[in-house]
Image (cartoon, helix red, strand yellow):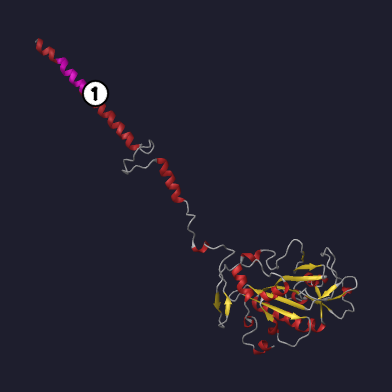
């Protein structure tokens, strides 16, 4: 009986050891389970993926993958919007026209002074509702008058009233009507009154003396008026045109005037720009201050030639390649009706 009672404690000891082993295995199992499900938070190797990627580096990698590359740009954005290339295309007539490689709406046209030649702070720029001019006190007239002419602008019942008067906006004082009296020269419009029939205000503005220049009567009422009328015909066809016109103020010139000394230019110019597709085009005219029976086409020149003659830089806000193409080439048939032989021969 003594042997049996002595064996009981051994069994209890073995059971206790087994329970400890089970408890240890359970703790290990729980630990492994927690580690397995929290590997990312603990910055441990990912057991799911089987790869080693530290959490911090993974975040950087994800951010970098979302960031667009600065080295490669789409072809449509590769060039500066102000420096897009301009090509040329054949028009329906077979003539070469400047192709509009830009957006349908040219952003540079939105600039208030887009159509103006280059000017400086020293220049006296006068802004009227219908046109803008650069007044040169030395010659008592404008070196250029610039405006955008539309088809709607030339329509209307407002007729000229010949209310010639000094321009109150000219700080140095403009010429006055009496300066022309008895001189034998017309008070010749630079921006013609007939271009502003749509508005009584615009019509009246056209009679400021800052918009006048001494012109030979045969010139003012002849070939010059003929050119002005032709421009209005073009604007009816093309919808809108940019025009810059003025005298060539250089060389030996006569002077008229009582109160002011007004120079009498020997030549005048007119520059016309059409930015409407499909034929974006430009043309210039250079005329002596005298009557002529020659055709308008005989006075047509490139804008570059007028720039050389006047020292002005026309349409400086045009992209360089576009400016070079438009101002360096000339095709009168793009302006004068191709099907009208009489017009081409006038």
Give coordinates of residue 297: x percent, y percent. 68, 84
Q: Nearer the viewer, residue 243 or 256?
A: 256
Please indicate whether residue 123 sits to the left or right of residue 28 in the image. right
**Residue 61 shows in the view:** yes
Q: Residue furthest front?
A: 252
Q: Is residue 152 left or right of residue 8?
A: right
Q: For residue 173, what is the image quadrant?
A: bottom right
Q: Is residue 13 magenta?
A: yes
Q: Eyeballing the image, is 156 above or below 127?
A: below
Q: Counting other residues with Cα less than 10 Å from the Cα at mark 1, is it few (<14), some (14-19), or many (20 or more)?
A: few
Q: Residue at x 57, y 81 (%)?
A: 95
Q: Indicate the position of residue 209 as horizontal and vertical percent values.
A: 83, 71
The residue tagged 1 is 20
Please state the horizontal and vertical placement of residue 2, each as a whole percent of the image.
10, 10
User: What residue lies at 74% left-to-right and 75% top-to-bottom?
Assistant: 195
- Residues 262 and 9: in front is 262
What's drawn in magenta, residue-wise?
8-17
Mark 1 element type: helix
């Amino acid at each position: 009986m003594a042997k049996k009672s002595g064996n009981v404690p051994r069994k209890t000891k073995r059971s206790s050891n087994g329970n400890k082993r089970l408890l240890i295995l359970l703790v290990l199992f729980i630990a492994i389970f927690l580690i397995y499900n929290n590997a990312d938070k603990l910055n441990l190797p990912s057991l799911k993926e089987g790869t080693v990627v530290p959490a911090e580096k993974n975040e950087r990698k994800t951010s970098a993958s979302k960031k667009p590359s600065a080295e490669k740009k789409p072809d449509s954005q590769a060039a500066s919007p102000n420096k897009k290339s301009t090509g040329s295309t054949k028009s329906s007539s077979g003539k070469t026209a400047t192709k509009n490689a830009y957006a349908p709406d040219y952003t540079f046209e939105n600039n208030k002074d887009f159509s103006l030649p280059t000017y400086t702070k020293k220049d006296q720029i006068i802004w009227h509702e219908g046109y803008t001019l650069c007044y040169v006190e030395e010659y008592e007239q404008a070196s250029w008058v610039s405006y955008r002419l539309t088809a709607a602008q030339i329509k209307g019942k407002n007729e000229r009233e010949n209310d010639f008067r000094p321009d109150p906006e000219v700080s140095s004082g403009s010429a006055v009507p009496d300066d022309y009296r008895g001189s034998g020269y017309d008070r010749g419009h630079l921006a013609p009154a007939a271009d502003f029939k749509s508005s009584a205000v615009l019509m009246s503005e056209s009679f400021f003396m800052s918009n006048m220049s001494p012109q030979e009567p045969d010139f003012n009422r002849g070939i010059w008026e003929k050119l002005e009328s032709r421009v209005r015909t073009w604007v009816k066809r093309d919808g809108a045109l940019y025009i810059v016109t003025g005298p060539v103020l250089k060389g030996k010139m006569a002077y008229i005037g009582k109160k002011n000394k007004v120079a009498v230019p020997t030549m005048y110019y007119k520059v016309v720009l059409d930015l409407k597709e499909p034929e974006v085009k430009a043309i210039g005219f250079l005329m002596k201050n005298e009557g002529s029976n020659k055709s308008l086409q005989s006075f047509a020149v490139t804008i570059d030639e007028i720039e050389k003659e006047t020292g002005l830089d026309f349409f400086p806000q045009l992209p360089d390649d576009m400016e070079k193409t438009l101002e360096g080439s000339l095709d009168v048939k793009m302006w004068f009706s191709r099907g009208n032989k009489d017009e081409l021969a006038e």
